[in-house]
Amino acid sequence: MKRRFVALAAALALSAGGATLVAGQASADDGTAAATASAARTSSLPPFAGKTYLITVDNGNVYKNTYSADGTSLHSEAVAGTGVGETFDAALATAQVGWGLYFTNWVEPNGVTVSHVMNFNNNTVKVYFTFATATGTRLGQLHSATMSCVA
């Protein structure tokens, strides 16, 4: 899974006209993907690094996401909607994919995978997450959200 994400991030970096991997996991089972991601890595931090954002999703869920100072990890708390009060910590993989646009991805402890395209030009987020059903089938959902910096 890591190898596929690193390859995706590297492809985004190459195809998005100067997009670069800025933080996150750049490891793989072989040196090729890691070397590609490492070459794309920059020393700049993503704009969410060290900050806390309220992410208000179109399904009524609201999350308080606190990002580490280096932008490589996330602490999230559900503050409205499904699962109020639930928290988790996760490692982030992040790529800048355009001017003010950042792709982030993580896997939650319950196996849910989450991808965000964060648009700092208009404070919006496109959210895609996948999860396993009771029968083991994997489903995905696409949502829109807004984000506001609270700390």
Image: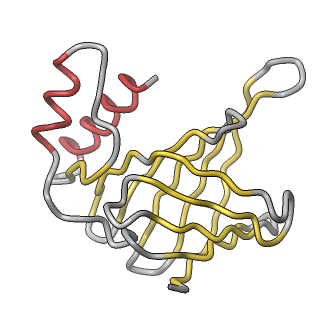
Query: In the picture shown, does residue 78 fall above or below 137?
Result: below
In the current view of this chain or complex, which residue is farthest to the left? Answer: 39
In the current view of this chain or complex, which residue is farthest to the right? Answer: 134
Residue 89 rendering spot, x and y as whole percentages? 58, 51
Residue 34 rendering spot, x and y as whole percentages? 21, 27
Number of numbered discs? 0
Residue in front for this viewpoint, 110 or 15: 110
In the current view of this chain or complex, which residue is farthest to the bottom? Answer: 150
Residue 68 rendering spot, x and y as whole percentages? 42, 63
Query: Is 61 on the left or on the right of 75, as rendered?
Result: right
| Residue drawn at (68%, 73%) of the image | 56
Quadrant in the rendering for residue 147: bottom right
Its colouring scheme is: secondary structure
Query: In the picture shown, does residue 9 fall above or below 44?
Result: above
| Residue drawn at (28%, 42%) of the image | 12
Residue in front for this viewpoint, 142 or 83: 83
Query: Is 82 on the left or on the right of 54, as rendered?
Result: right
Query: In the picture shown, does residue 147 fall above or below 83?
Result: below
| Residue drawn at (33%, 72%) of the image | 47
Residue 30 rendering spot, x and y as whole percentages? 23, 13
